[in-house]
Image (tube, helix red, strand yellow):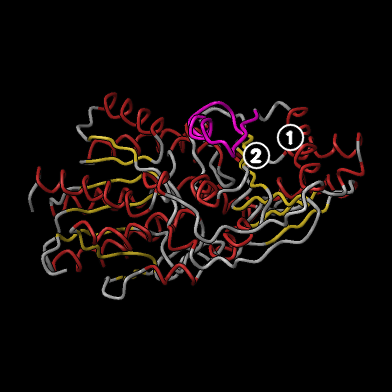
Amino acid sequence: MNDSRQFLMISYAFPPVGGAGVQRSVKFVKYIRQYGWQPTVLTVLNPSVPVLDQDLSRDVPADVSVFHARTLEPSYSFKRNLIHTPNATPSRLKTLLRGWASRWLQPDAQVLWNRNAYGTACKVLKQRTFSAIYVSGPPFSSFLLGCQLKKQFGIPLVLDFRDEWSISARYLENRSQQRSSHRGQTQMFESTLRQADAIVATTLASADELTSCCKRVGSSAFVRCIYNGFDPDDLLHLKNEPIKTKAFRLVYTGTLWKLTDIEPLVRAVQKLSMRSPHDANKLELHFVGRRTGEQEAILDKLASTPVQLHRHDYLSHQQSLQFACEADGLLLTLADQPGAERVVPGKLFEYLALKRPILSLVPEGEAWRLLAEEPLATNIHPSQIDAIEAWLRQAIHAKANSDSPVMPLPNPDLSSLNWCSRSTLAGALAAILERVANHNPP
């Protein structure tokens, strides 16, 4: 589109990197050209990440320029081995390396990408006229990179908080425990808010929180919410095959970690197994995606129950959707922890589009409110173990008494979900880019 306005997208999480966070950036790239904006992408050449997903690259239009810069980070396996020392006391060298990394690699290890990324970005920004810079985080070190580029080139800056900085700092596995680290991250966070022209959040509650933060630190940035969503194109490729088992298939897709704790479901299944082993034998649980060691240990508790437990490593986005499509029920979890009330897992919108019953084990908050009016969704607080068990028992009996196999719905009516389609959400980002570009013309 020759008459399109140009913007630079900086996103460490970009294909072939896999994971839920990647989808947000790549779907913006796929659809935003419909609204008169042409993206140019800067991403990492050698990502130090846990998973890759080549399938997501198909969403990047062929005429979108993608530039790569090398990071100086060690491999992900090295970083993981540094953090985790199962059943052993970490060596002195590991302890020293952890301390050094915790002190100097702030706000995250991906700060080792910034120097090369800055050099590449400068070359790109000198080649043509850009009306805005958009940065997706985490990693939040990329926000520091965006601030550097704004200072150098005077181009309006949009920061997209895929997660809240404070929530990530509180719950991530590799979070630093040092007080100096917390103070430094707070200073970095506040500095980026002051330098931004616009800030994007993924929930209304997070947008309110960031608005309050902006007022507190004297930032003039305006804040908007753009939810995550679903892409109707992704549903077109799902296989229309019946599932002929009498067991009730409950499927969870995505990462299991501290903020998506599976303990409440496991306790309910254990209780079901003690009260009715026959029912538990007709429950089929599928967990598709990465799991922390802590969450794996919780799932191990089900080994002594008759439930059919299936653990799958990370699958491509399309394969993960196929698992969800073949489910009798879909599981959504959020731990009852401070800040969780402002979180809406990205999978929620794809769950809605798949038109399957949803068991939502979340505290009262934004995810709860989004599902409260959905006839296929049931909200249960994570502490209500008896209620979770009752839902499972009822679902198992309903499936056992049904003569109809589960059939995926290849062409459901999704008109009521237009508000969270990826195309509509790209239009919301385009409106933000228009506002910052018109206020600060290049």
The residue lying toward the viewer, choosing from 203 and 420, is: 420
Find numbered disc 1 in the image and state the secondary structure of the residue it sits on: helix
Find numbered disc 2 in the image and state the secondary structure of the residue it sits on: strand
Q: What is the magenta range?
A: 362-380
The residue wearing badge 1 is 391
Q: Which mark is residue 277?
A: none
Look at the image and say whether residue 367 sits in the magenta stretch.
yes
Look at the image and say whether residue 240 sits in the magenta stretch.
no
Residue at the spot 51% in from the left edge and 31% down from the top edge? 373
Q: Position of residue 173 (x, y in %)?
A: 59, 46
The residue lying toward the viewer, choosing from 148 and 137, is: 137
Residue at the spot 31% in from the left edge and 64% down from the top edge? 42
Residue 363, relative to residue 119: is it above or below?
above
Report which quarter residue 37 is drawn in: bottom left
Find out whether the residues at labels 1 and 2 contact each other: C-beta distance under 8 Å: yes
Q: Position of residue 442 (x, y in %)?
A: 8, 53
The residue wearing badge 2 is 359
